[in-house]
Image (cartoon, grey):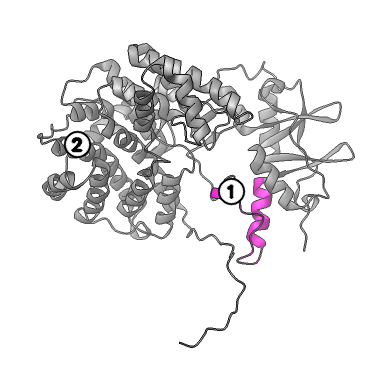
Amino acid sequence: MRTLVGDLMSSPAVTCGTGTTLEEAARIMRGAGTGSVIVVDEAKVAGILTERDLLRATAAGVAPARDRVEGWMTAQPHVLGPEEEAEAAWSSLARHGYRHLPVVDKGELVGVVSWRDLTGVARLRPPGEPATEIPPGLEGVVAAETALGDVRGEEGFFHYRQYSAVELAERRSLEDVWFLLFEGRLPTAAEARRFAEELAPLRVLPPGVGQVLGELAGAGTPLEALRTAVSLLGAELGWRPTLDTAPVELRAQALRLCAVVPTILAAAHALGEGRTPPAPRADLSAAANYLWMVTGAEPEPARARAVEQYQILTIDHGFNASTFTARVITSTGADLAAAVCGAIGALSGPLHGGAPSRALAMLDDIATPERAEAWLVAAVERGDRVMGFGHRVYKTDDPRSLFLRAVARGMGGPLVEFATEVERTAVEVLAAMKPGRRLFTNVEFYAGVVMHECGIPRDMFTPTFTAGRCIGWAAHVLEQASHNRLIRPSARYTGPPPPVPVPET
């Protein structure tokens, strides 16, 4: 039976005028219990304003009582007709990156349809019957709900909880953001001090992991050593399945894990080089202590802050491959260590966490600004991927890259100047040779530059990413475990039509 948009939409649509203030629009949304409002101008759809837009405006420091919705809405959004099928709504929402779409009949606004409306239909379908065509890589498919944060690729904006991630990187410490993800709010000054005091002793390696880490470091990379060490950590500390673990105990496990992961990585790096790992220091922040353990030198405050800001910007980023892996494993009721081991495995892939060093290797290969254009043109013609450019979600500048570019320029130096020149040339080449793709630098391009300038060796770029992202994984494990349901999607069979008789041997 066909399901039409008109059968799913909410009607009448909640509306406001283009001259409505953000404050009044927020009041309208709250009163209607909806996450969006359709902006109309003389009864015609002019735009759509969502809770995310209000969040973005708040992060920008606007005056809600004065600023109008027309400055923050998505103007001239795609609209649907009530007679269109639900599959068309799925496709449009995924293609445009929207969560709500106006429904218009004969030029008149008659309702609004949302992801939630369509998800409800998908759940009512017979098991095994997909709701629509399956997008490659599940792009645009909503797999779960989260209150931890979101990424708005069309706008170049992402947030943790209700705060702009970029603003958090500008103004707060890694520990503050860690607290925010775990507790749902930013800490007071007193809470921040207590939280830091709680974390510092948790950095020390437990005896069992410490005993075998040298052997692990000699057998593989720091990230490979971490994967095994985390599994051992869970066994040594007796972590039970999340299904059988009380929330307060699971939180304690998550704090222990996230505090000791940087120690494991830094110690594995030192042992792999034949050095004795420095002991973690309780007098340093998480980022400064990590830099101290990796380099063995007293960290300069500016460098420690740069590493901290990088880790804040990459602590979480929507339902990326490793985060989704952690949540799927947690949904089975498995223990925290199992979930994080799976996440580490996903992150180890070069298409996910391994690009910063590859972007720097590309700069090495280009060598001089004069070679950049010819090198990039040849790479694109060969069909090679230009490392550090383009993103699965962002269709405009990656805000993390913009922030790290500014951090790099603040450090200065020949590598920074060279990277900036290559970026300019690459954007021009990609615009000319891949028109319509809008390929800009992603976080990996300047992340490699910043980490290099901070003294972090290349084989520790992805581990440095992991040391911060572990906090995001753990927060997602806590959230998944708090209202768990086994994640068990369907697949569409594409083989020969059954049944075929089984031949005799």
Residue density around tag 2, few if under 14, some if 14–19, many if 20 or more, within 10 Å: many
Can you say which quadrant of the picture contains the C terminus? bottom left
Residue located at (26% from left, 43% from top)? 256
Residue density around tag 1, few if under 14, some if 14–19, many if 20 or more, within 10 Å: some
Snapshot quadrant of residue 252: top left
Can you say which quadrant of the picture contains the N terminus? bottom right
Q: Which residues are magenta?
A: 115-137
Q: Is residue 238 above or below residue 443?
A: below
The residue at the far right in this view is 106
Position of residue 366 in the picture relative to residue 22 (left or right)? left
Residue located at (64% from left, 64% from top)? 129
Snapshot quadrant of residue 192: top left
Position of residue 434 in the picture relative to residue 217 (left or right)? right
Whether the magenta-drawn stretch holds residue 124 is answered as yes
Mark 2 and mark 1 residues within 8 Å of each other at the beta carbon? no
Q: CA distance from mark 2 to mark 1?
A: 38 Å
Whether the magenta-drawn stretch holds residue 60 is answered as no
Residue 141: numbered disc: 1
Snapshot quadrant of residue 80: top right
Q: Earlier in the sequence, mark 2 or mark 1?
A: 1
As helix, strand or loop, the secondary structure at mark 2 comes to helix
Percent x, y of residue 468: 34, 35
Q: Nearer the viewer, mark 2 or mark 1?
A: 2
Residue located at (70% from left, 23% from top)? 69
Residue 269: numbered disc: 2
Q: Using the rendered image of the protein, determine whether residue 162 is visible from the camera's viewpoint.
A: no
| Residue 393 vs residue 495, the one in the foreground | 495
Residue located at (23% from left, 17% from top)? 300
Position of residue 307 in the picture relative to residue 209 (left or right)? right
The amino acid pointed to by label 2 is His
The amino acid pointed to by label 1 is Val
